[in-house]
């Protein structure tokens, strides 16, 4: 049985898929001593199919400066803005609305986000996504 490596750092980074900025990687990973160029190459190769999206990654760095990358789904607010073609949410979400999210769009976002949510039920995931949308000043159709 192989000996488990001890984790020295664990960082979550939100990077552009297929084109991670070396500046961002250098700032966050530089102090850890890991090969940032190799992290960028691995990240870009793994996320090339999602180019243009923001794909969070959890970088686990071990004592010997090796690393493991764990990819997550894009942030919920990003998926909602992209579905609606918005650049940002409302300035005052409680009293101002910027758009209306249809049930189909809500379902698409929920299905995309499902692997990172704490549920396997699409209806529950839709409720969670709807809550995020409301906090951005986005109305939900049929509510």
Image: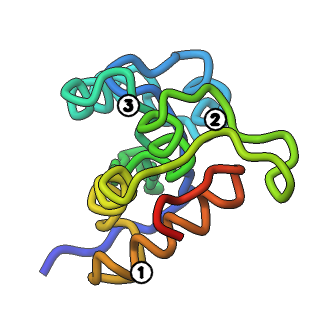
Q: Which residue is mark 3?
A: 39
**Residue drawn where x is 67% and y is 32% of the image:** 88
Mark 2 is surrounded, within 10 Å at the Cα level, by few (under 14), some (14 to 19) or many (20 or more) other residues, namely some
Disc 3 and disc 2: Cα gap in Å? 12 Å
Point out which mark residue 118 bears: 1
- Residue 95 vs 110, above or below: the answer is above
Q: Earlier in the sequence, mark 2 or mark 1?
A: 2
- The kind of secondary structure element at disc 3 is helix
- Residue 97 vs 19, above or below: the answer is below
Residue 72 makes an appearance in the image? no
Q: Earlier in the sequence, mark 1 or mark 3?
A: 3
- The kind of secondary structure element at disc 2 is helix
**Residue drawn where x is 54% and y is 47% of the image:** 100
**Residue drawn where x is 54% and y is 57% of the image:** 10
Name the image quarter holding the N terminus. bottom left
Give x and y (percent) for residue 43: 32, 32
Residue 139 in which image quadrant: bottom right
Q: Earlier in the sequence, mark 3 or mark 2?
A: 2
Point out which mark residue 28 bears: 2
Identity of the residue furthest to the front in this view: 142
Residue 50 makes an appearance in the image? yes
Disc 2 and disc 1: Cα gap in Å? 28 Å
Disc 1 and disc 3: Cα gap in Å? 28 Å
Q: Looking at the image, is mark 2 or mark 1 nearer the viewer?
A: 1
Give x and y (percent) for residue 32: 59, 41
> Taking 99 as reference, is 72 left or right?
left
Give x and y (percent) for residue 99: 60, 41
Identity of the residue furthest to the left in this view: 1
> Taking 47 as reference, is 133 left or right?
right
**Residue drawn where x is 22% and y is 34% of the image:** 46
> 26 or 21, which is in the foreground?
21
């Amino acid at each position: 049985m192989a000996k488990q490596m001890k984790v020295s750092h664990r960082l979550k980074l939100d990077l552009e898929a297929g084109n991670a900025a070396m500046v961002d990687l250098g700032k966050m990973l530089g102090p850890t001593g890991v090969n940032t160029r190799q992290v960028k190459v691995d990240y870009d190769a793994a996320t090339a199919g999602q180019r243009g999206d923001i794909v969070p990654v959890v970088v686990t760095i071990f004592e010997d400066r090796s690393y493991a990358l764990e990819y997550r789904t894009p942030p919920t607010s990003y998926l909602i803005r992209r579905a609606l073609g918005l650049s940002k949410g409302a300035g005052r979400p409680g009293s101002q609305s910027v758009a209306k999210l249809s049930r189909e769009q809500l379902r698409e976002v929920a299905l995309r986000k499902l692997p990172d949510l704490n549920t396997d039920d699409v209806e529950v995931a839709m409720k969670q996504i709807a809550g995020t949308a409301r906090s951005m000043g986005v109305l939900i159709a049929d509510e």
